[in-house]
Image (spheres, grey):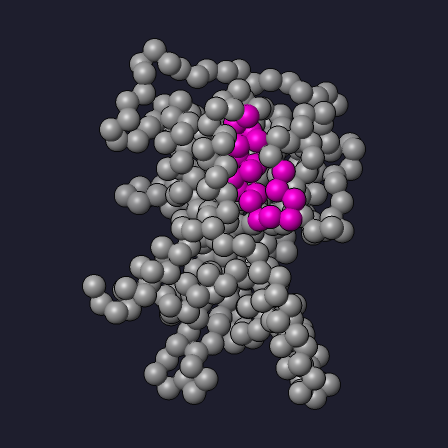
Amino acid sequence: MATGDQGLYQLKKKMDEIFPYDEEEMAKAEKEMADYLKTLSATEAAKKRRQNAEVTELAKLKFSKEDDDSDGGHFEGIKMNGEKNTFQKINHIDHNWVRKHFNPLFVQLCETKDNMWHEIPLGKAMNIDDGQPPSKLSTLVATKYQQGREEYCLVYSLISAIHYCGLDYSCDPIKVHAERISKMAQLGALQEICLLMRTFCPLIGKATKFNMRIKGKKVRREITIEELVSSRCAYPTLVVPLGRDGSINHAFCVVDDLIFDSTCRNALKLTTESFNWICGRQGCAGIHRAIRFQGKEGVPGVPIPKDKNFNREPRVNWHE
């Protein structure tokens, strides 16, 4: 194995372990940014702040490293425009800003696997100032797994929906992988979720992917917010929404007439208004990716009993 490949292997191995949130590192990055801005003129400092604000909602990150780079390389980003469904490239993102906003292992992955685009990990933590949804959007159905300050939306929203469906025996074996998955780039995290479902919840382990390119298939399945809201499904559908601000960093799970968002104490009503609330002030532009779990599918070597099936009909939890 080449030296570079060895380094990448060790890094990916690290990403499979559990790493605590390092407040000291984040505080250090913030101080370095503040000190750096003090060295600039007022005009340059204002320009740098505007640039940093521009990249708040990145979809992808890349560390570009050329032979003639005097500074050893620089970060670039891709920002999505949810309104126009277009992309904008952001050049020369400040190193300190990247360190402040992303997990150190994800940053290290970008630097190690340079000159490649890496999707931003899924994970939207609940800040202390974040409010709960208005009562008109909430239901009486509790969200079993709430993430609090952690960035576990992908796993916790899914297992909350699974628990609601009555497959609670599958929840804890999947839950233990939440921290590891929160550090992974988005596509890798979704693939890992599919594997965990086949392993621990095989009665609905078959994944149907929407708005995603499937290898070997020319046509991809599409799904819209309107379809999810109007054609209610009795099986869990993981959703990565596209905010009008370009954000694709959150996930929740839809089942029946409910939205399980692990930043909320109770499930939300499955409505367009709830989608808009979840995505913030500018609202939701559409569905970036979605995966529905329905039908039997396990992992090789682990047979699923033929007499075991899981069938359910959509349940009504709220009325207008």
Q: Quadrant of the C terminus?
A: top right
Image x and y of residue 27, in percent: 64, 68
In the image, residue 116 sits, relative to residue 15, either above or below, namely below
Q: Residue at x 69, y 32 (%)?
A: 266
Q: How many marks?
A: 0
Q: Residue at x 67, y 87 (%)?
A: 40
User: From the viewer's perspective, is 25 left or right of 191?
Assistant: right
**Chain part drawn in magenta:** 146-163
Is any part of residue 64 visible from this angle? yes
Q: Residue at x 40, y 56 (%)?
A: 14
Residue 157 drawn in magenta: yes
User: From the viewer's perspective, is 266 left or right of 208?
Assistant: right
Residue 247 lies in quadrant: bottom right
Q: Main secondary structure of the magenta part?
A: helix
Q: Residue placed farthest to the right in the image?
A: 135
User: From the viewer's perspective, is 4 left or right of 73?
Assistant: left
Residue 315 lies in quadrant: top right
Q: Quadrant of the N terminus?
A: bottom left
Image x and y of residue 131, in percent: 76, 45
Is any part of residue 254 visible from this angle? no
Front residue of 188 and 208: 188
Image x and y of residue 307, in percent: 34, 11
Image x and y of residue 29, in percent: 60, 71
In the image, residue 313 sits, relative to residue 242, either above or below, namely above
Q: Residue at x 28, y 26 (%)?
A: 302
Q: Residue placed farthest to the top in the image?
A: 307
Residue 38 lies in quadrant: bottom right
Residue 91 drawn in magenta: no
